[in-house]
Each structure stands twice: as structure tokens, then as C-alpha cells.
Image (cartoon, helix red, strand yellow):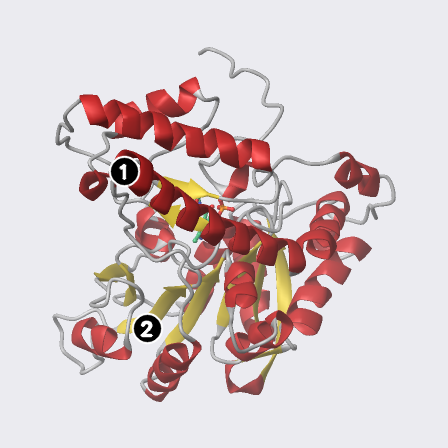
Amino acid sequence: MSVAPVYTSSSKDFRSDTFTIPTPEIWKTVAAASVGDTIYEEDRDTYLLEARVATELLGGRVFGNEESRGLFCMSTTMSNQLAIRAHLNFAPPYSVLCDDRAHVYVDECAGIAVLSQALVVPVKASNDRFLTLEDIQQKYVPDIDDIHLAPTRLICLENTLHGMSFPYDELKRISEWCHAEGIKLHLDGARIWNAACASSDTEPETYLKDISKLVDSVSLCFSKSIGAPIGSMLVGGIAFRKRARHLQKQQGGGIRQAGFISRIANHCLDTNFPETIKTVSKTTKEFWNDLHSSIKTNYGIELHLAHPVETNFIFLDLVKSGINLEKLLEVGEANDVKLFDGRLAFHYQNISPECLNALKKTFIDIAIYYQKHEYKPEERSARIY
Ligand SMILES: Cc1ncc(COP(=O)(O)O)c(C=O)c1O
Ligand SMILES: C[C@@H](O)[C@H](N)C(=O)O
């Protein structure tokens, strides 16, 4: 197995917002980190981070005005899977309903099936953006004492999903219906920070509190737009957190001296939420508008979106845009730009003029190429989603 080259900068890495690297300031915070054993809940920095997120930022309440607590986890895959298992705390058969693009379904290694022994019911959003209550009602499995069925016990939503915010009013409708039906609601909020900063009518801190009151649990990631190297927070009711923490230990997710990781996450929250995240979103939208118009005006090529640009992602529809994935990656590499596919991810370390110019030049070179060469339809035009 060849050793990967030393990774020194995420400045032209547009694969994901997970690629940001620790800064000198981040390393400086580590020296003062607490060193208690988190498994015995003796670490001060971890306690403070859990309290800051669950109580200060999310208002200390989840659905039903239930008092909430935070559980620090190593990743959002872990916090999502712990949430799902902790909610499904009775015997199968049961099912979990989610968007057919959801990370918990597409990218968490069949964790729901294996760890929670649950059927997953993936649902297509009829508006291509977010699941509506009607989408859910069409596909959920009712608890009607039918021996053939695995009733829906949990619904997992995602905000943002593919960079798109989940509308608050729809989430409220779904929450009211779920809880009337006795169904729990988990929110994969890996990028809820971005949704909070994109809200046009609510301050980010108010947005987080409002959303938290609609769900039974929510995962919030520190290793994406918040810019920390590691970490996630699972927020839910006290009894739920106790069960999730027990399952976390069982899965080997218990953390000893987590203080330095928690301290870094806290520092990154201070540094990047909300203003930096707002700047990244604004830059993403401006970049897209400039790229689309200049490629069309100067080269006669129309770039098409797979989703609207709402936060820190541009999802290009490479097929409709007539761009071959392999050619895009090849031209990206020639411009020192890293891409997975047509998903362009923006973060606080790749939005300098130099970085954006390298990305724009990638698409100028692509446009020049397709002025002389034909697009060849191919099997797959996306690697990530
Ligand atoms: C929406 C969403 N949820 C959860 C995760 C999982 O996070 P982690 O990589 O920390 O496991 C990701 C990707 O990283 C994601 O994009
Ligand atoms: C690939 C996926 O797991 C990751 N969350 C990303 O968005 O890059």
C-alpha cells in the first residue's frame, strides 16, 4: 500500500468541507486543554462544550420541551447511528424513514440495518429538494398490527442536505404529525450551522433553538464548516443521552482524555460560527453567478445545477452540462484543484481569490476543451452523491 503524500493545504481542495486542516491558532489552544477521563465524565472542556451546544446554542430543550444534554462523539456517522439505535430501544421489526439521498442511508455503511436491525424506507423528495409531510405519509409504514409490516418508529431528516436548507415550516408540520403518530424524529444536522446562517428571517442562534424544539435529537458536526479536525455533538433528552452514551461505550466510541479535541471544537465554534460560515455561503453564491455567466458569455457553454445554491455547495449536473467526470478531474488536477465530481464544496480555507481563480480556470479550460471535443455520455457522473 503506497503512503499518501503529505497533505499540507486544503486551499484548492473543493472535494468537501471536511478537508480543512488545523491552523497554528488551533494547535495553540491545545496546550491549555483539560485532561479528565471523559468516560467517567470528568473532563472539563468536554463538559463545557456539551453544555455550550446543548444548552447555550440549542436552548436546552428538544421536542416536548424536554430538557436536553449533549454527548460528544468522534464523528457524525457515530452520533447519527447512536441516535437511531437509542430511539429504537425496543424489539424489531421496525423501520426508519429518510430521504433517499440521506447520509444516514447512502453513506453510513448500512449502519441502520446492521446496528439497529431496522428496515430503511428511503423516500424520494417529490420537489427534489426536501421531503414534505405528504411524501412521508405516502411511504411511512403505519402501526396497524399487521403481521407483515415493520412500522415506522423513527424518521431521520437532514439539514442541510446537499447544501439545501430544510424549510422550518415544513419541519414543523412533519414534527407535529410524527409526534401525533408516536414516531420519533432525528435530525442529521452535520451542516445545521450552514442552514442557520442561511436563514433569511431568523438569527442563527435563534434558528438553532427553534429547530431543536421540533426534534427528539440532533447531530451537529464540528469537522465540516466549523473547521475542527474531529468531533460531533449529539443532543437529545436526558434519558436518550444516557442510552446513547451506553451504546457509544459498547461500540468503542468512549473517549478518554477528549479535552484537547473538545477545546479545539470550541475554538473553531468561536472562530467560524456564524460570521465565517455566512461569508463562505455568500462567496459560494457569488462564485456560481460569476462562473455561470462568464462561461456562457465567453464560451457559449451552459453550466447546469443539480440543486439550488443555498449554502456552501455548488452541485453541478455534469450530464446536463455536457462535462465528462474524468475530464473534469483531469483538468482540475492540471490546475492543482481537487474535486470528487460535480459537487464543489466551499470552506473558510478555499475562498481566497487565488483559490477561486484556480477553480474558475478549471471550468474555462473545460469550456475550451468542449468547444473542440464532443461530450461522451458515461455510466457515472458522480462519486459522492
Ligand atoms: C450530512 C452528513 N451527515 C453526516 C456525515 C458524517 O460525518 P462524519 O464524516 O463526521 O462521520 C456527513 C459527512 O461527513 C454528512 O455530509
Ligand atoms: C462523503 C461524506 O461522508 C462527507 N460527509 C462529505 O460530504 O464529504
374 or 108: nearer the viewer: 374
Mark 1 is surrounded, within 10 Å at the Cα level, by few (under 14), some (14 to 19) or many (20 or more) other residues, namely some
Instruction: Looking at the image, tell me whether mark 2 or mark 1 is earlier in sequence order.
Output: 2
| Quarter holding residue 109 | top left
What's under tag 1, amino acid-wise?
Ala
Rendered position, 15 above or below 263: above
Please tell me which residue is depicted at 31% across the width and 85% down the height of the picture: 181
In percent of the image, x 55 and y 79: which residue is there? 210
For disc 2, the marked residue is: 153
Q: Residues within 10 Å of mark 2 (few under 14, many from 20)?
A: many
For the residue pair 56 and 298, the one nearer the viewer reads as 298
The quadrant where residue 370 appears:
top left
Q: CA distance from mark 2 to mark 1?
A: 32 Å
Of 90 and 294, nearer the camera is: 294
> For the C terminus, which image quadrant?
top left
Residue 250 location (% of width, % of height): 53, 50
Say whether residue 254 is left or right of residue 154: right
Above or below, 302 relative to 170: above
Q: Position of residue 122 (x, y in %)?
A: 24, 60
Mark 2, secondary structure of its residue: strand
- Horizontal side, residue 380 vs residue 359: left or right: left
Disc 1 target residue = 382
Report the disc number at residue 147. Answer: none
Q: Which SS class for mark 1?
A: loop
Left or right of 67: which side holds 271?
Answer: right
